[in-house]
Image (cartoon, rainbow, N blue to C red):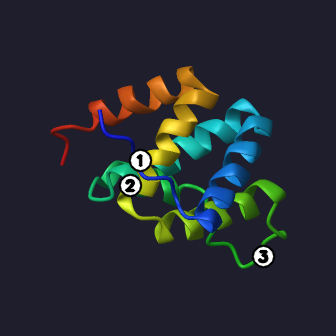
Amino acid sequence: MAERPLPARGVAQEMCCVLHWFSGWAPPQRQRFLRDLLAKAVPGKLRPLLEGLEGLSLSGAPAPPPSLFQCQLRLWDQWFRGWSEPERNHFLARLEQVDPDFAAHFYCQLAATAGQE
């Protein structure tokens, strides 16, 4: 069985940050992260896109400053976009080690998107 190449040092540090944040997130934050992860895994699916839009506000009132969690998700999004496919797979493998139940739920949700248009 061939070993996966390790991610570059900077990418490895980014992954460590995200996994550290993940360990401190409350269940609702983890659910939000799950939706984001699913949207990244199946970008052509409409449902995750619509779920991501649910937090947008069209009111004229100024938006409050982002929470720490929102800032973390923004960084996660920027970093994830820069990762190669093997690096993304490595991140998922690390996530499986950190929280096998979360990873199993992710894979179950991912499988449920098969065949949806």
Location of the N terminus (image quadrant):
top left
Residue closer to the observer: 65 or 97:
97
Secondary structure found at label 3? loop
Secondary structure found at label 1? helix
Circle 3 is placed at which residue position?
61
Depth check, mark 3 against mark 2: the one in front is 2
The local crowd at label 1, few if under 14, some if 14 to 19, many if 20 or more residues have their Cα within 10 Å, is few
State yes or no: discs 2 and 1 in contact (Cβ < 8 Å). yes
Circle 1 is placed at which residue position?
89
Depth check, mark 3 against mark 1: the one in front is 1
The picture places residue 112, in percent across and down from the top left corner, at 29, 31
The local crowd at label 2, few if under 14, some if 14 to 19, many if 20 or more residues have their Cα within 10 Å, is few
Residue closer to the observer: 82 or 105:
82
Q: What amino acid is labelled 1 in the image?
A: Asn
Q: Residue furthest front?
A: 2
Reply above or below: 68 against 59: above
Q: Residue furthest top?
A: 101
Q: Residue at x 49, y 71 (%)?
A: 82
In-image side of 58 versus 3 (left or right): right
